[in-house]
Amino acid sequence: MSESDVTRGGLRGARPGRDAVTGAQDAGRSRRGRRRRGRGRGEQPMVPEARFSSYYGRPILNKPTWQALDIAGYLFLGGLAGASSLLAAGGQASGRPGLARVAKLGAAGAISGSLGALVHDLGRPARFLNMLRVFKPTSPMSMGSWLLAGYAPLTMAAAAADVTGRARVAGAGATAAAACLGPAVATYTAVLLSDTAVPSWHEGYRELPFVFAGSASSAAAGLALACAPAGQTAPARRMAVLGAGLELGAFQLMKRRMGLVAEPFEQGGPHRLLRAAELLTAGGAALAAYPGTGRRRGRACAVAAGVALLTGSAALRFGVFHAGVASAEDPRYTVVPQRERLRARTG
Amino acid sequence: MSEGDTTAVSATGGEPPPSGNLLSGPQPNVAGAAGYPDAPPRVGFFTDTSVCIGCKACEVACKEWNAVPEDGLELTGMSYDNTQGLGADTWRHVAFIEQRLPETGREPGGGHEGFDAFEAARNLGTSPSPSPSPSPDGAISPVSPDGRTELRWLMSSDVCKHCTHAGCLDVCPTGALFRTEFGTVVVQADVCNGCGYCVPACPYGVIDQRKEDGRVWKCTLCYDRLGVGMEPACAKSCPTDSIQFGPLEELRARAAARVAQLHAAGVTEARLYGESPQDGVGGDGAFFLLLDEPEVYGLPPDPVVTTRDLPAMWRHAAVAAVSLAALGVASFAGRRR
Ligand code: SF4
Ligand code: SF4
């Protein structure tokens, strides 16, 4: 094996290690007979398992270190706040002060909660201001931080002006400005998830912003239905129906488009969460569409619709979060689609 | 970096200009694109797994030099690999794959029954090793009459790929991850706030968060050693030169020659992984010679930097945001109640 000479001057010739030839005898025999395949993880998959190899079934990706409560909560609260800002501005412009107040308080409260969750999830919470150290369009988290840095104070100013009844003009301006940023706050979180190597998040990048937009509307509508005076909730009812439709439709489309990596959405815990989200959102929207008869019944109906819509939206975010983590933990979802892509490319 | 006899880069005098697209595709001048006007040539690793003996000297040297803490003493029971994978406290990981393959009649045969080691040792260097009977043509498995299979061990020292387009670096919101003048990717521990975004952004599962400390850690390609002209600790310690360090251009040339050599010797399964600037991450700064499919070693077969699709993601999100605003307006349109 060694083609080198050890001399007084040191090693001459080829380095033995570098140029050793492994098992070189039988020229040209293909070794396609590989028997290795990933181990299943207890569960029997519904579709016939695509054959693939893996390193002892271990994941290829490092799964997100994020805490479900913090990050799924952040997504939910961000959506609630963003869409509430729309209801706030609309309520204010259309002379529905009760609706506007609930929405303004909702937006300010939700965005504070979401910021709290974000900071809590940092490994070094004391360094949260480092988020504003750079402005980086390639980082959705950086863009989101700047967005929130602009948006959160606006919602608070709007809420404060409304509650205190002072600085009405400034308050109205803040409300309008928050409504301009709100939709971005509600949808950028989809980019936050998609801009990762996590298969079930990345592959949904086309539809996920629409799912989140719909989910944000149904949450904001739910809050307004549950808390605003009954006479002023007509826009919230309409928003609930439109939002639920957008959310459910976009989600179905997304799953159909994603192929294999849609599987984590339809298995185990994430599936239960998403199924619950579907039922709650659809049920909440149906309840919202019916104003109900009589005062007491109407009120109860609206509260039930609101609670269903809010929990539905939260369940959707947790479902999407956990499905992504599950897709990162199973090498199947990394290997199989990439193999298919390679095969398609090389023909 | 010392043994640069024919590096294409230094021969042409200076780096090629950075290519326009900063998110994906070939990028001949990473350091230039990151804002270093006259950077030294890009350096990296060529890990030739065909000569790796699985001694883990690299793992140890890395831990020692970089003072990486202990990461749990676990016995996996799956193989001799108890390190398991790259993470915050494992910057070099030696994968260890035990494969049962159909008997191929190659030198390191399977069953050793009836093999006299002393006899073989006596003949060492004097006579050519007895060549095993050739396997029947076209047969796949099992080719030996008694159904015996051959055992082979694949060993490979995995590391951060120091991608040309690094997902971790792209998504870091604080600028803690940065591109060095050597074209490598390094975390600044004093800036990282532990947001954890880089962890799921890495298509190879390299970078991870250290729980006790909250921040993320990964291979620095021994940035401190590079700065004073020394090669990284793992490459230095590798007894078989499986880990080779040097200017990337030179490593690529060397790797191509090595693959040709192995192919000529009949090791047709030898292939390079991560070396092509045309791949989904624009080529790895640390690339490999493998003897099986990448996924067998726990590597993704066709990794793509997630930010390649970021412009499309922003576009979709913008349309969704406008739709949401329209939905808000529509909710207030229509008859008053
Ligand atoms: S391999 Fe992962 S951690 Fe290393 S540079 Fe590439 S994306 Fe970053
Ligand atoms: S965890 Fe640290 S290095 Fe990673 S993205 Fe966040 S700030 Fe950047």
Image (cartoon, rainbow, N blue to C red):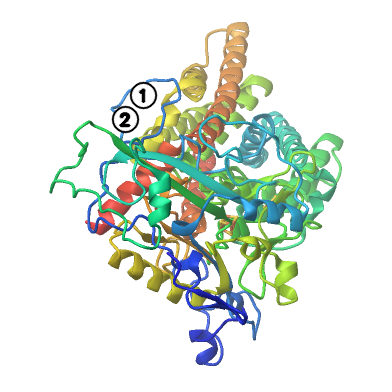
Circle 2/circle 1 CB separation < 8 Å: yes
Q: What element does badge 2 sit on?
A: loop
Q: What element does badge 1 sit on?
A: loop
Q: Is label 2 within 8 A of ligand 1 (CB to nearest ligand atom)? A: no
Q: Nearer the viewer, residue B303 or A270?
A: B303
Q: Quadrant of the C terminus of chain B?
A: top right
User: Please, which chain is the residue tagged with disc 2 on?
Assistant: A
Q: Is label 1 within 8 A of ligand 1 (CB to nearest ligand atom)? A: no
Indicate the amino acid at tag 2: Glu
Can residue B183 be seen from the camera position used here? yes
Q: Left or right of B92: which side holds B79?
A: left
Q: Left or right of B223: which side holds B325?
A: left
The CA span between labels 2 and 1 is 7 Å
Categorize mark 1 by other alpha carbons within 10 Å: few (<14), some (14-19), many (20+): few
Mark 2 lies on residue? A49
Q: Quadrant of the N terminus of chain B?
A: bottom right
The residue depicted at 59 percent of the width and 27 percent of the height is: A314
Position of residue B292 measured from the top left corner of the image (x, y, whole percent): 37, 51
The residue depicted at 28 percent of the width and 27 percent of the height is: A48
- Quarter location, residue A115: top right
The residue depicted at 45 percent of the width and 67 percent of the height is: A2
Mark 1 lies on residue? A45
Position of residue A105 measured from the top left corner of the image (x, y, whole percent): 75, 33
User: Please, which chain is the residue tagged with disc 1 on?
Assistant: A
* Marks 2 and 1 belong to one chain: yes
Indicate the amino acid at tag 1: Pro
Q: Left or right of A169: which side holds B154?
A: left
Categorize mark 2 by other alpha carbons within 10 Å: few (<14), some (14-19), many (20+): few
Q: Is residue B289 above or below residue B295?
A: below
